[in-house]
Image (tube, grey):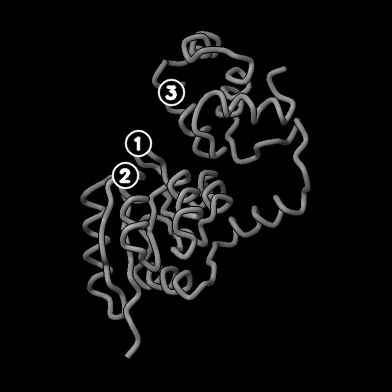
Amino acid sequence: MTDPIRVLVADDHPIFRDGLAMLLTSVDGLEVVGTAADGVEAVAAATRLLPDVVVMDVQMPRLNGVEATRRLAVDAPGVGVVVLTMSEDDGTVFAAIRAGARGYLVKGAEQEEIVRAISTVAAGGAIFGVTLAQRIAEFFAAGPPQPTDAFPQLTAREREIFELLAAGRSNAQIAAALYLSPKTVRNNVSNVFAKLQVADRTEAILRAREAGLGR
């Protein structure tokens, strides 16, 4: 008899998190060893429990799923990560793959698809949709990014805000320049940090300057 695949579920929405944990518990061959409500908890639980797979939401408080995945790649490289996203076109997923995730699931996926993704990653494989696989192939085929096409994972709005951020503008100044609410700017800045795998404004500006932005 083979050992069950040990799974940790990390998501900040308790109803979804608990529902997914219950669903996976009901599947033969899977064992849910723990849950986490944010990225900090996910890293701590994964390094302590060493599950075979972490099912990781990309948007979580305290520490987003991209940064949590990057830390696990260093602290617990034997733990596979499957990221959760609302959409296959979510650029954050691409950032998570670059951080070390080996697969992704769209929220609302069927049980069979969820189990297949977890099983594939637990066995050391990787599983991506056609759109994401194509994006990854294009990224590696393109070579070093040029200033005009750097950071393709950013939306047009995020790039617009990122360029102003790179020029040293504060959130308030960006909001005034683009006629946006401070909350909208904050949310977009957070998305930029997650997609670029940077921890703070200083690191984001350095990344931008390296790519020729904000000079």
Mark 2 → mark 3, Cα distance in angstroms: 19 Å
Which marked residue is nearer to the observer: mark 3 or mark 1? Answer: 1
Q: Amino acid at mark 1?
A: Arg
Regarding mark 2 in the picture, which secondary structure is present there?
Answer: loop
- In this picture, residue 48 sits left or right of residue 85: left
The structure residue drawn at horizontal position 53% and vertical position 66%, both measured from the top left corner, is 127
Identity of the residue furthest to the bottom in this view: 1
Quick one: label 2 or label 1, which is nearer the N terminus? Answer: 2
Quarter of the image for residue 161 reads: top right
Check disc 3 and give the amino acid type. Arg
Image coordinates of residue 91 in percent, x first then y, are 55, 44
Q: Nearer the viewer, residue 188 or 214?
A: 214
The residue wearing badge 1 is: 62
The structure residue drawn at horizontal position 34% and vertical position 44%, both measured from the top left corner, is 40
Element at label 3: helix
Circles 2 and 1: CB distance less than 8 Å?
yes
Location of mark 3 (residue): 186
Residue highlighted by disc 2:
38
The quarter of the picture where the C terminus appears is top right
Of tags 2 and 3, which is closer to the observer? 2
The x and y percentages for residue 37 are 27, 47
Label 3 and label 1: CA atoms lie apart by 15 Å
Amino acid at pointer 2: Asp
Q: Residue at x 53, y 35 (%)?
A: 198
